[in-house]
Amino acid sequence: MDNHTTERPAVGEEIDLTAKAAAQILKLRKENNMPDGHGLRIGVKGGGCSGLSYVLGFDAEPKPNDHVFTREGVRVFIDPKSLFYLSGTVLDFSDGLDGRGFVFNNPQAKKTCGCGSSFTA
């Protein structure tokens, strides 16, 4: 690990994954033939109907200044700006009647859009 990453965010700055979300992430990584070391990048970008959009993807390595930690067997990378907006969030996976996909349960979201992929902090 390089000197510009932290292995665990400070208390209160954490993001959690449910067991269901972690299982789906590990399944996707395997289906796409990604090595075990690849991590899940969780982030926020400007845009979407509520102002900020959630971003999920895979990266081989963390970027400088990323917070790096492991949840439910999944290595997670998150940049400091995104962590500011996502602190306390729980990432879940839904495959119920109301839709299939990742669900962000973000306590900082003051308003969310109908599709659940963007929010206002």
Image (cartoon, rainbow, N blue to C red):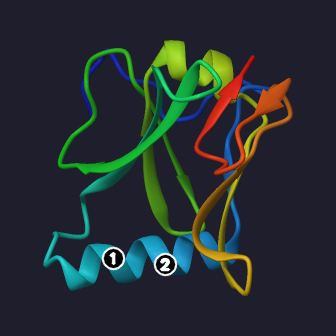
| Amino acid at pointer 1 | Leu
Mark 1–mark 2 contact, CB under 8 Å?
Answer: yes
Give neighbour class at mark 2: few <14, some 14-19, many 20+ (Cα, 10 Å).
Answer: some
**Residue 71: x and y, percent?**
59, 58
| Amino acid at pointer 2 | Gln
Residues at marks 1 and 2, CA–CA distance in whole angstroms: 6 Å
Nearest the eye: 5 or 13: 13
Q: Quadrant of the C terminus?
A: top right
**Residue 118: x and y, percent?**
61, 35
- Describe residue 52's horizontal placement relative to residue 11 as left or right: left
Residue for badge 2: 24
Q: Quadrant of the N terminus?
A: top left
**Residue 28: x and y, percent?**
33, 76
Q: Give the vertical position of 32 relative to 44 (above or below).
A: below
**Residue 55: x and y, percent?**
43, 39
Q: Is mark 1 on a helix, strand or loop?
A: helix
Residue for badge 1: 28
Nearest the eye: 81 or 13: 81
